[in-house]
Amino acid sequence: MEMRAAFLGLGAMGAPMAHNLHRAGHLVAAWNRSRRRLDAFLRQHPVHAADTPAELAAQARVIFTCVSADADLLEVIEQLSPALRGDSVVIDCSTVSAATALQANRRVGEHGAAFLDAPVSGGVEGARNATLAMMVGGDAAVLETVRPLLESVAARIAHMGPVGSGQATKAVNQIMAAGINQAVSEALAFARAQQLPLDKVIEVVGSGAAGNWFLSHRGASMVQGSFEPGFKVALHHKDLLICQQMAEQFGVSLPVIEMTLIHYRRLMEAGFGDEDISALFRTKSALFEQSES
């Protein structure tokens, strides 16, 4: 297979993923809705600058997409579809609903091309370091043909089943991430109220049974009041709404989702939607501050 790839969507996750494809010698073209982001990327990556998604799709057999919302994905799929060939493969790394992935698959399939839903986890750090976990839905044989490309951006690639399975697995990840965020931010706010040395708390707790990625990567910055995004509150809020809708199909309301949506909405209303999800520490700390007043 000719390992030529094009990348659509150069946001916080997409740009470093495209960079890693370029570093591996696979990237030949890029497109982004905002020309400013595209120009910034091109200054360090001399690839073809596509003016439209269709032009992008004509440059390579494999087209990666990484956008923010379901409607955005369906829009760009509609725009690039006319340029797809029978041997084209569209790999979507966005976080959208499984139903949207199935819609995109149908549209791509109308042109004889293949589609993989391949959302990722690992934050901006994982995207930069090519250590992402990737959850793939689609034809297993298609996945194997493009695996060398995926290995340029992800350290763990798991085939989860047919199209939509990748997004369903990502929903599992997002629910779990919400619960961990709730637990870590609440526990550290409690530790602060107990006047404990927070650096030592993070070190000792992180080395025991309660240790986790979020505590080790966000604990120190969280308690210092630094919330530079690896994963924005507003984006996780969007993802949890998807999870909520998926759960509602079974007539189920999941407490972790419901409570985290409330907390995130309050953070967004207070102007913190573009901060990292560890900004939930603001909400937890306020509980103890209110009890003291």
Image (cartoon, rainbow, N blue to C red):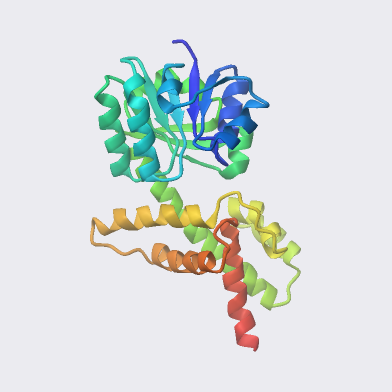
Percent position of residue 47, x then y: 58, 19
Q: How many marks?
A: 0
Judging depth in this view, the residue of 286 and 209 nearest the camera is: 286
Q: Is residue 120 left or right of residue 38?
A: left
Q: Is residue 243 visible?
A: yes
Whole-percent x, y for residue 195 in the image:
73, 76
Q: Residue at x 48, y 60 (%)?
A: 179
Q: Residue furthest bottom?
A: 293
* Residue 115 at x, y percent in the picture: 34, 27
Q: Look at the picture and state if 86 lies above or below 176.
A: above
In the image, residue 270 above or below residue 82? below
Residue farthest to the top, as pictured: 1
Please, is residue 68 above or below residue 251 in the view?
Answer: above
Q: Quadrant of the C terminus?
A: bottom right
- The picture quadrant where one finds residue 79 is top left
| Residue positioned 41% across, 29% down in the render | 91
Say whether residue 177 is visible: no
Question: Where residue 273 sits in the image (x, y, percent)?
Answer: 54, 59
* Viewport quadrant of the N terminus: top left
Residue drawn at the location 57% of the way across and 71% of the way down:
283
Looking at the image, residue 40 sits to the left or right of residue 154; the answer is right
